[in-house]
Image (cartoon, coloured by chain):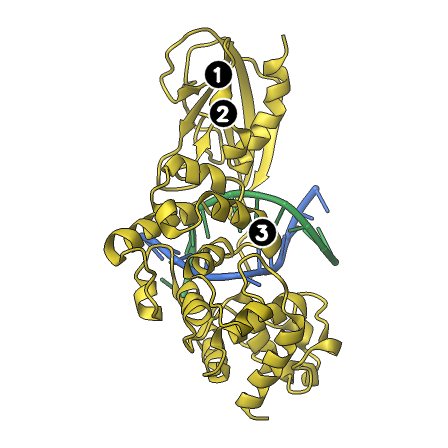
Chain colours: A yellow, B green, C blue
Amino acid sequence: MRDAQLSDDLLIWYDRHARVMPWRVGPMERAEGIRPDPYRVWLSEVMLQQTTVAAVRDYFRRFVALWPDVGALAAAEDAQVMGEWAGLGYYARARNLLACARVVVSENGGQFPDTRDALLRLPGIGPYTAAAIAAIAFDRSETVVDGNVERVMARLHAVEAPLPGSKRQLGALAAALTPERRPGDYAQAVMDLGATICTPRNPACGICPWRDPCQARAEGIVASLPRKSPKAAKPVRHGIAYLARRDDGAWLLETRPERGLLGGMLGWPGSDWAQDVPPHAPPVAADWRDPGMQVRHTFTHFHLRMALRLARVGDVSPARGRFVPADRFRPSDLPTIMRKAYDLAAPILSAG
DNA sequence: CATACGTGGGA
DNA sequence: TTCCCAAGTAT
């Protein structure tokens, strides 16, 4: 079968099965010549990096309501943007999002560049996102290669070499299929196919638009592809977090360093996290209580067990962090690990 | 090329 | 419970 026939078949499938998403331009609007807003395409693609559509939906809606265009976002306070991103994960994305918005406004008059190469130079935009924005927002024939595309190509062409070594080969196979016409729809079509039909487990080959040309299906090896190199086991790390509440209801919090885990996010002062709890001092002198509570949380590359220490304090000066008044503290501004600690501690520190 | 970087849902 | 995984990027 010719490559052009394959991409045509997928576009026909996409026209009937495309999922509705807040950042997509529907068929009706597209028929009226409406193009996707590059700002919304960019924002959604950054949020979708390593993150499911279901998790992104409400964050995307909230962001565009608060900041309708790149100029508004560029003018936002760092702390507010980080707070709105809280819970979505990979917080370097939020820091880069702001940096990118400010570059676009200050160096490009608020217009996103319309080529893959120019987009690639912006913070937080890598090969995938640059191609996605160029194709979807600017109708350029660029090839998007994400996890979905890799999986679909590995199966369509029965590539048995394991990832990540096979990335280059899978990218070349994807490029050979990218059409000149409707490249943005095609890009989203392959990803939709991977997300809904050609899934990692239990793929729905019976209703796949590419079931006939699929080589892995012909060979009966769909379920085993793509092959992947084995992953390292996650070690367990331990730490202690200190939750202090002042008599007037204020909470002792700190903004974490820009670099590293949860960089730039609000959190409870505490020890570093290591195989054994590292030596450290509490953030403020107080009658610290051990409630026997532990927050268990799994990050990308380790499991964490974070023990809690709780205290009620008077009008003291902390060595670390700052007291945030109760009426200015939103638990939703906390990354999930820190919010779990709050959820455990709040009932105790709020009582009488 | 390998590693750091979050989270929630599903099997 | 545990493991895997999701529209990747930066270093």
The CA span between labels 3 and 1 is: 32 Å
Q: Position of residue A211 (x, y in %)?
A: 69, 82
> Mark 2 belongs to which subunit?
A
Above or below, A4 against A187 in this view is below
Q: Which residue type carries mark 2?
A: Phe
The CA span between labels 2 and 3 is: 24 Å
Classify mark 3: residues with Cα within 10 Å, few (<14), some (14-19) or many (20+): some
**SS under mark 2:** loop
Quadrant where the C terminus of chain A sits is top right
Of residue A104 and residue A287, the one placed in the foreground of this image is A104
Whether marks 2 and 3 lie on the same chain: yes
Residue for badge 1: A250
Q: Which residue is drawn at the image coordinates 59% and 93% (left, top)?
A: A1
Residue for badge 2: A329
In the displayed orientation, state which residue is furthest to the left.
Answer: A107
Visible in this render: residue A150?
no
Q: Contact, CB < 8 Å: mark 2 with mark 1?
A: yes
Q: Which residue type carries mark 1?
A: Ala
Q: Contact, CB < 8 Å: mark 3 with mark 1?
A: no
Classify mark 1: residues with Cα within 10 Å, few (<14), some (14-19) or many (20+): some
Classify residue A16 by image quadrant: bottom right
Residue for badge 3: A57
Classify mark 2: residues with Cα within 10 Å, few (<14), some (14-19) or many (20+): some
Horizontally, residue A265 falls left or right of residue A15, namely left
The CA span between labels 2 and 1 is: 8 Å
Q: Which residue is drawn at the image coordinates 47% and 84% (left, top)?
A: A176
